[in-house]
């Protein structure tokens, strides 16, 4: 039995690129040779995208379309595509041809060689503003330093995932989704595939600054407890410093040195603030646990089993 591939393409106001994008992706998929489906998820487009999708779907039975009632955002559009996909491997790609469809061939080869995840790694980014490149570079490094999950640098959501990885995604129903982080969190055998990120074929970015910031926050909040527990460490340091200050005042008193009595008040004030921060940090630690339980991720993920009966 031949394996099947599912291509998942989120679409938001992309009437300028859809037609060309479909032609190129379809050609690549046909060349790869497996049976395939292309799943477009229309994320509440307000332009002519849906009209074009209807026509493409009418003429091409391998194309499936799911259309949202409103704009839910890129990460949820991709999730919806994963929910619908029936393939043995799923490929997630942007519609705007920034991720060159030809790279899918390399991903599929890596998958045939046993990779569970083949993720696109940007060697170079073309046609993106210096601001975007700079902020992206800083952000991924910040996230890496804050997170216990090793999220690979310079990768987006362009990737191939095996069916068993997709099945874990289906179980992870956290609402604020940062898919590239979730994928890294799962582990599995992940192989980077280097590629040059092209310029957008046409149209403007659909990731407004607000959406970018929101995604960046989701990445940090979902994959790092640092913001919650940071103030605990700060509180501990401040408390200790004020205690040292008080000790110094005691020694000064013993040595008969004169100093302003206000210094005691100052140290006391600093100590109280330190303790407040310390307890905020402790509360943060509990909140962190609650947040973990709420996310309800699987406790563990089994990648392979031997000698277990089905
Ligand atoms: N997209 C989406 N919903 C949104 C924003 C974007 O489905 O709210 C899609 C968009 O159509 C494209 C992909 O997500 O296929 C990436 O968006 P874009 O190319 O605008 O982002 P950039 O590459 O500039 O970061
Ligand atoms: Mg793009």
Image (cartoon, rainbow, N blue to C red):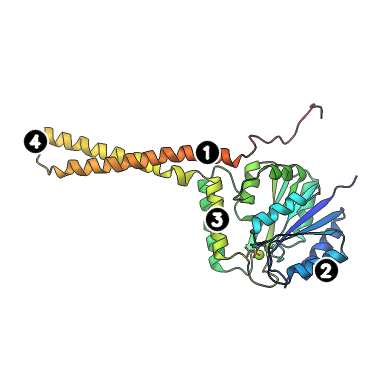
- Cα distance in 3D space between marks 1 and 3: 22 Å
Q: Nearer the viewer, mark 1 or mark 3?
A: 1
State the SS at label 2: helix
Picture residue at 78% right of the left edge, 48% below the top: 89
Which one is nearer the viewer's eye here, 174 or 99?
174
Label 2 vs 1, first from the N-terminus: 2
Residue underneath mark 2: 55
**Which label sits on residue 216?**
3
Residue at the (41%, 40%) spot, across then down: 281
Tag 4–tag 1 contact (CB < 8 Å):
no
Nearer to us of marks 4 and 2 is 2
Mark earlier in primary sequence (3, 2): 2
**Which residue carries the number 4 mark?**
256
- Direction right: furthest residue: 1
Q: Position of residue 210 (x, y in %)?
A: 54, 63
Query: Which one is closest to the eye, mark 4 or mark 1?
Result: 1
**Badge 1 vs badge 3, beta-carbon distance below 8 Å:** no
Q: SS at mark 1?
A: helix
Q: How many marks?
A: 4
Q: CA distance from mark 3 to mark 4?
A: 56 Å
């Amino acid at each position: 039995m031949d394996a099947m591939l599912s291509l998942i393409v989120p679409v938001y106001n992309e009437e300028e690129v859809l037609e060309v994008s479909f032609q190129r992706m379809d050609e690549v998929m046909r060349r790869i040779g497996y049976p395939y489906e292309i799943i477009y998820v229309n994320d509440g487009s307000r332009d002519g995208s849906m009209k074009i999708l209807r026509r493409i779907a009418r003429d091409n039975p391998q194309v499936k379309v799911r259309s949202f009632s409103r704009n839910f955002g890129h990460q949820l559009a991709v999730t919806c595509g994963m929910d619908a996909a029936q393939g043995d491997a799923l490929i997630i790609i942007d519609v705007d041809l920034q991720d060159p469809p030809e790279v899918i061939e390399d991903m599929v080869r890596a998958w045939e060689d046993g990779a569970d995840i083949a993720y696109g790694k940007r060697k170079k980014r073309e046609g993106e503003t210096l601001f975007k490149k700079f902020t992206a570079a800083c952000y991924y490094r910040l996230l890496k330093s804050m997170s216990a999950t090793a999220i690979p640098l310079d990768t987006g959501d362009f990737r191939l995932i095996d069916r068993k990885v997709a099945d874990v995604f289906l179980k992870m129903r956290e609402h604020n989704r940062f898919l590239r982080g979730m994928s890294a969190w799962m582990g599995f055998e992940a192989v980077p595939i280097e590629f040059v990120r092209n310029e957008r074929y046409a149209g403007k970015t659909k990731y407004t600054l607000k959406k970018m910031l929101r995604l960046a926050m989701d990445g940090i909040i979902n994959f790092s407890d640092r913001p919650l527990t940071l103030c605990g460490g700060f509180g501990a340091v401040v408390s200790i410093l004020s205690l040292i200050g008080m000790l110094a005042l005691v020694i000064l008193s013993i040595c008969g040195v004169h100093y302003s009595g206000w210094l005691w008040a100052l140290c006391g004030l600093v100590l109280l603030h330190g303790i407040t921060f310390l307890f905020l940090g402790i509360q943060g630690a509990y909140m962190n646990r609650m947040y973990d339980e709420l996310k309800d991720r699987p406790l563990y993920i089994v990648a392979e089993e031997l000698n277990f009966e089905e």
